[in-house]
Image: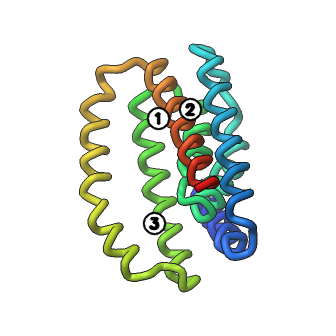
Amino acid sequence: MVPLCLLGAVLGVTLLVSLPRRATLAAFGVLLLFYGVYTLYQGKVVRMISRGWAPLAGFMGGLMGTLFGIGAPPYAMYLSHRITDKAALRATLSSMVLMSTTIRALVFALGGLMLRDRLVMFAVLLPFALAGLWWGNRLQGRISREQLGRFISLLVLLIGASVLIRAFT
């Protein structure tokens, strides 16, 4: 997924400066809301998908990460339908988000879009991200895979709602 994530990030930076911001944010928010509702409706049924979807998930995560600042949903969508072990799912998703964020920062820096204040904010927020990883690691043993799936679906819904609010404010 990582090489296609890089390709998606490069395309995302290009589109970031040329697409109408509100329309793309609104479309992305609606997509996330529909997917969140769809996965909550599915319940315990998790249909496994082919590894062939990995390049698309990587590309879309890179693209969405640079366009909207939120690249995790495509990774979560793909990985939750590939990995059955919840600890492996969480670890893989966390690793992919870390790689994607690193790629995004690199592409923004090379494209002249990474400003000093953003680097400072990154440094300020990093301890909170690490605390979230630590907390998630301790919590993951206490929840089932189905609960984790519902939690991911709810997060996708909340992110979709947040993106829609951002599109219209």
State yes or no: discs 1 and 2 in contact (Cβ < 8 Å).
yes
Marks 1 and 2 sit apart, C-alpha to C-alpha, by: 7 Å
Residue 26 drawn above or below residue 3: above
Picture quadrant of residue 25? bottom right
Tell me the crowding category of disc 2: few under 14, some 14 to 19, or many 20 or more residues within 10 angstroms, Cα based. many
- As shown in the figure, which amino acid type bears the numbered disc 1? Leu
Identify the residue at horizontal 47%, vertical 62% (top origin): 101
Quadrant into which the C terminus falls? bottom right
- Tell me the CA gap for discs 3 and 1: 20 Å
Q: Which residue is mark 2?
A: 80
Badge 3 crowding class, 10 Å Cα cut-off, few under 14, some 14 to 19, many 20 or more, is few
Mark 3 belongs to which amino acid? Thr
Residue hosting label 1: 89
Tell me which corner region of the image, top left, top right, bottom left or bottom right, holds residue 156. top right
Q: Please give the residue where the numbered disc 3 appears in the rendered image.
A: 102
Tell me which corner region of the image, top left, top right, bottom left or bottom right, holds residue 78: top right
Asked if residue 69 shows in the view, the reply is: yes
- Colour logic: rainbow
Q: Residue at x 63, y 57 (%)?
A: 64
Badge 2 element: loop
Residue 124 in the figure: left or right of residue 78? left
Q: Is residue 85 visible?
A: no
